[in-house]
Structures are given as C-alpha cells and as structure tokens.
Image: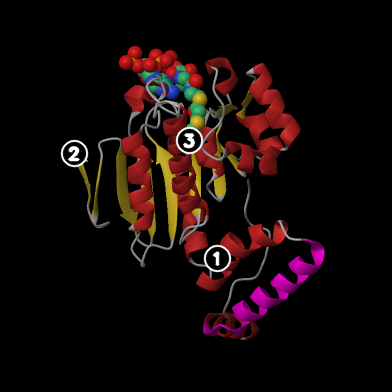
Amino acid sequence: MSAAHSASGFGIELPPSLKAERRGDVAVLTLARAHKRNALDDPTVFAIDAFFEALPDEIKAVVLAAEGEHFSAGLDLGELTELNVAQGIAHSRSWHRVFERIEFGKVPVVSVLHGAVVGGGLELAASTHVRVAEASAYYALPEGTRGIFVGGGGSVRLPRLIGVSRMMEMMLTGRSYDAVEGQALGISHYLVPPGTGLAKGIELAKHMAGNAPMTNFAVMHVLPRIAEQDRAAGYLTESLIAAIAQGDEEAKARLKAFLEKRAPKAVHNRKG
Ligand code: 1HE
C-alpha cells in the first residue's frame, strides 16, 4: 500500500485517499479522494478496515467525514468492469466485512454527510451509528441505472432505516432525496447548515466518547440483536445486558454522582 499520508499516532499507513487525525479521545477519518468524488476503490475500503481494526484503546469515538463537494460517489465503478461472477461475490463480501467492522466495532461512529451520498457512499453512511447531514447532502441508489445491485450491505441496512418499499422505489426510479427529505426519512439524525457538519460531528462524538463503555457496547452490539429477536428472547437479553451494565463500577460511580448532584441533568438542550 502506498503511504503518502502517514496516519501518525494510529500505527498504520493510509493511502492518499484517506486522512486521519486525533481530537483528544475522538479520531477523525476523512475520505480524501475528492478528484474522484470520493469514489470507494479497494485501497480506500481496505484502509478503512485497517484503520478501524488498529484503533487505539484511548480512542472512544470516530467521526467519518469527507473532503471536497461530495461525501462519496459510491463504489469506484472502474473496479467492477474486470470482475467475473466469483470475483464479484468476493468483492461484495469484502465490503461486508469492512462495513461490519464499522457497525459492530469497538466505538461508535458519526458520519458527516454533504453533497452526493450515493450508492456505496450511502451504504457506508448506513453502517455508521449517527449521521449528521449538511444542507447540501442528497441520497440516491443509482445502481439500477448502472446495471448492478447494492453490494455493501445496503439491502440489509437500508430497509431497516427507510423501509423496503422506499429502497425499492429509489433503486427502480433512480430518484434522489435532498437533505430535508433525508432527515424526514430518518437517513440523517441531524441536519445542519453548510460547513458546520464536522463541528457537529465532533461535538456528538465527544458526547458518545464520554458515555460509559459498557453502555456504548450494549447500544452498539446488543440493541440491534434484541431488535431482531422475538419478544420473549428480547426481554430476556435486555434484562441480562441491563444487569451487566448496571453492575459495572462505572455505572455505580455515575449513579452516585447524580444522586450527589454532581452529574448533569437530562434537560432538553440539544437541537437537531
Ligand atoms: C467516479 C465515480 C465513481 C465520479 N466511480 N469514478 N455511483 C454512481 O453511479 C455515481 C457516479 N458519479 C456521479 O454521478 C458524479 O460523479 C457525481 C454526481 C457524484 C459528481 O458529479 P461531478 O460533475 O461533480 O463530477 P464528475 O465529473 O462526474 O466526476 C469527477 C471524476 O470522478 C471523474 O473522473 P475524471 O477522471 O474524468 O476526472 C469521474 O469519472 C470520477 N467519478 N464518481 C469511478 N463512482 C458495493 S456496491 C455499491 C454500488 C455503487 O456504489 S453504484 C453507484 C456508483
């Protein structure tokens, strides 16, 4: 792998299409292939994998952002032209592994979206836990137009986010949704003015980094599994993880801090 940008402090070398920096206990990973609209080629996808695998223990949350006018134009279409069927399966499965590492990784990830968030770019965004959209963001699944299908887990994640019917319509008609529509659909959780997404993303990442690690683990790894269980199994799993979380030293200290009026209250002070 070429190493024009060394990921100083992260123990790995990154290709020129990625940059990484630390902001205290938050890492910011930036897609930096703006001349190709941050199209996701193999070196980029595999380096995203390596970055999340090598994440130091002191990093408690990640922000995924992008340089240029667009978050990501999706899969680098140049890469599919040479693949036969077996290689196509392997390629898609490799994306699955990488995006699973994000979704079911060590720490929560907030993505900051702007411009085109299309195809594999939307699949990548869907694998993050919190999505902040700037007003320029728009969402589309142009795979139908290109004669292909989603391959980065989009058919698993997006129906859970926006519903099978909506995804079907997006793929069949080539429709794009703007940032306001995307917010209403639940693609983004925050809709912010142009140029403010990164600051919002870092603010949210800092909040998540401050959560008890056991709570973040339960939310990221257990909650999605409970949502796929039947009710009886779900209640049982919930009781088990609730007991594990509350039994942790961290929980005891936090509960005590609240009772002794040393902890913030759950007041309504944040805007989307
Ligand atoms: C690319 C890609 C790409 C741009 N693969 N090279 N995704 C798509 O179908 C979206 C394709 N991209 C676009 O529709 C447009 O590029 C944008 C609307 C995002 C931006 O338009 P624009 O006018 O700002 O840029 P551009 O002139 O189209 O692109 C600039 C360069 O980036 C140009 O290369 P150049 O060498 O001529 O300068 C483009 O070819 C290149 N480029 N997008 C390769 N996607 C795991 S399955 C997932 C399946 C999918 O993701 S399918 C959806 C693919």
**232 is higher (above) or lower (below) than 85:** below
User: Which quadrant would the C terminus be assigned to in this image?
Assistant: top right
Q: Bin the neighbour count of mark 2 within 10 Å (Cα to Cα): few under 14, some 14-19, many 20 and up.
A: few
Image marks 2 and 1: residues in contact by CB distance under 8 Å = no
Q: Residue at horizontal 53%, vertical 28%?
A: 119
Whether residue 199 is visible, yes or no, is: no
Tag in front: 2 or 3 = 3
Q: Is label 3 in a helix, a strand or a loop?
A: helix
Label 2 CB-ligand 1 distance < 8 A: no
Residue occupying the far right of the picture:
231
Q: Amino acid at mark 1?
A: Asn
Please name whichever residue, 270 or 80, is drawn nearer the observer in this view of the structure. Answer: 80
Q: Magenta includes 155?
A: no
Calculate the distance from the C-alpha at mark 2 to the C-alpha at mark 1. 34 Å
Calculate the distance from the C-alpha at mark 2 to the C-alpha at mark 3. 30 Å
Q: Quadrant of residue 169?
A: top right
Q: Quadrant of ligand 1?
A: top left
Which x, y percent locates residue 213?
50, 70
30 sits left or right of 15 in the view: right
Q: Is label 1 in a helix, a strand or a loop?
A: helix
Name which of mark 3 and mark 1 comes first in the sequence.
3
**110 is higher (above) or lower (below) than 72:** below
User: Which quadrant would the N terminus be assigned to in this image?
Assistant: top left
The magenta region covers 230-249
Q: Which mark is residue 4?
A: 2
Which x, y percent locates residue 38?
39, 29
Q: Amino acid at mark 2?
A: Ala
Report which residue position mark 1 lands on. 216
Q: Quadrant of residue 185?
A: top right
1 sits left or right of 22 in the view: left
